Image (cartoon, rainbow, N blue to C red):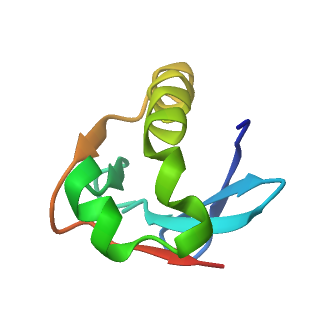
Amino acid sequence: MDFSFQSRWKEELVCICPLGKLVLEMPMGVPSVYIPSEQAWQDSAPAWALPYWQALHSQLVKWCADHGFPLYVDNSASVFAA
């Protein structure tokens, strides 16, 4: 699954793929991106996105590196459908 990424004014990162859109935390005070751990993902992501944590994570690693943002995997990070 291929994702594209767009930052949004509410300190959010929109992750877009053919199946839908997800929103992750992207605080601007200290520019960074947060994604739930793979285990927490299973409890919080929309049903259609459950199998795609690994694909999203690996693409986020590259995107964050390309844009100079640290990426944090955090059990308390939020994810929701856009």
Query: Foreground residue, 31 or 18?
Result: 18
Residue 48 picture quarter: bottom right
Residue depicted at 23% across the width and 63% down the height = 40
Query: Foreground residue, 72 or 44?
Result: 44
Q: Does residue 37 appear in the picture of this structure?
A: no
Query: Foreground residue, 12 or 81?
Result: 81
Left/right placement of residue 69 relative to residue 8 reads left
Determine whether 38 is above or below 7 in the image: above
User: From the image, which quarter does the C terminus lie in?
Assistant: bottom right
Task: Give coordinates of residue 42: x percent, y percent.
Answer: 33, 64
Q: Does residue 49 appear in the picture of this structure?
A: yes
Determine whether 47 is above or below 15 in the image: below
Looking at this rendering, what residue extends furthest in the left direction? 75
Determine whether 81 is above or below 50 in the image: below
User: From the image, which quarter does the N terminus lie in?
Assistant: top right
Determine whether 9 is above or below 36 in the image: below
Residue 2 picture quarter: top right
Residue depicted at 46% across the width and 21% down the height = 65
Task: Give coordinates of residue 46: x percent, y percent.
Answer: 52, 75
Left/right placement of residue 66 relative to residue 17 reads left
Left/right placement of residue 15 relative to residue 73 reads right
Count numbered badges in the picture: 0
Task: Give coordinates of residue 13: x percent, y percent.
Answer: 56, 59
Looking at this rendering, what residue extends furthest in the right direction? 18
Task: Give coordinates of residue 59: x percent, y percent.
Answer: 56, 29
Residue depicted at 26% across the width and 66% down the height = 77
